[in-house]
Amino acid sequence: MPKYLVIANQTLGGQQLVRRISELAASAGSEPTQLHLVVPVTKTDGTHQWDYPPIDRYIPDATVLARTMAQARLDHEVERLRHEDIKADGEVTDNDPVDRAKALVAEQKFDAVLVSTLPHHLSKWLRTDLPSHLDRALDVPVEHVEGSAGPSV
């Protein structure tokens, strides 16, 4: 059974990533494809984004919002993939996915890692060259999929 590690956040469910996952599943033929999705929480500046303490009581800070959105994207995409008969699970992790990817690759066998980013002019991950960092850190092939954001959740 082919097994892939997918690292994505805002591009989960986006057209280009969906197409690439479908191609991988189709190339496996009748054998089921398995995916493990890692959704890093978008880094926010500081722990509290609001200037006035009374507002903090009503509006969660940016870190809480980012984690909630990452979890919602993950849940939505796992459900969508399961409807396509793709075995999928996943986790929300800290902002930098390199350490988590290294740990997962050490624990499990993956055929490849897909890292999905927004286009270069929008992607913090491309400005920090995340695909190359993953390629150097892992002993499995790393494929970069650049694309649009997925559906809002």
Image (cartoon, rainbow, N blue to C red):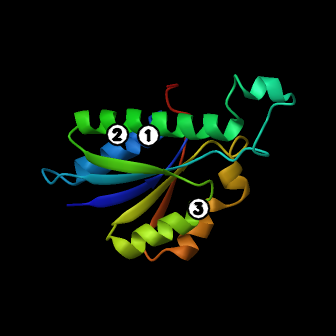
Label 2 vs label 3: CA separation?
23 Å
Q: Is residue 45 left or right of residue 80?
A: right
Relative depth, front residue between 38 and 137: 38
Label 3 vs label 1: CA separation?
20 Å
Q: Is residue 112 above or below residue 37?
A: below
Question: Badge 2, how many Cα within 10 Å: few under 14, some, many 20+?
Answer: many
Residue 148 can be seen, yes or no: no
Which x, y percent locates residue 47? 75, 44
Please report contact status of discs 1 and 2: CB closer than 8 Å, yes or no: yes
According to the picture, the residue beneath numbered tag 2 turns out to be 78
- Mark 3 element type: helix
According to the picture, the residue beneath numbered tag 1 turns out to be 74
Which x, y percent locates residue 11? 53, 39
Q: Is residue 92 left or right of residue 109?
A: right
Residue 76 can be seen, yes or no: yes
Q: Residue at x 71, y 59 (%)?
A: 128
| Amino acid found under the numbered disc labelled 2 | Val
According to the picture, the residue beneath numbered tag 3 turns out to be 131
- Mark 2 element type: helix
Residue at the limit of the structure toward the left, as seen here: 30
| Amino acid found under the numbered disc labelled 3 | Pro
- Mark 1 element type: helix
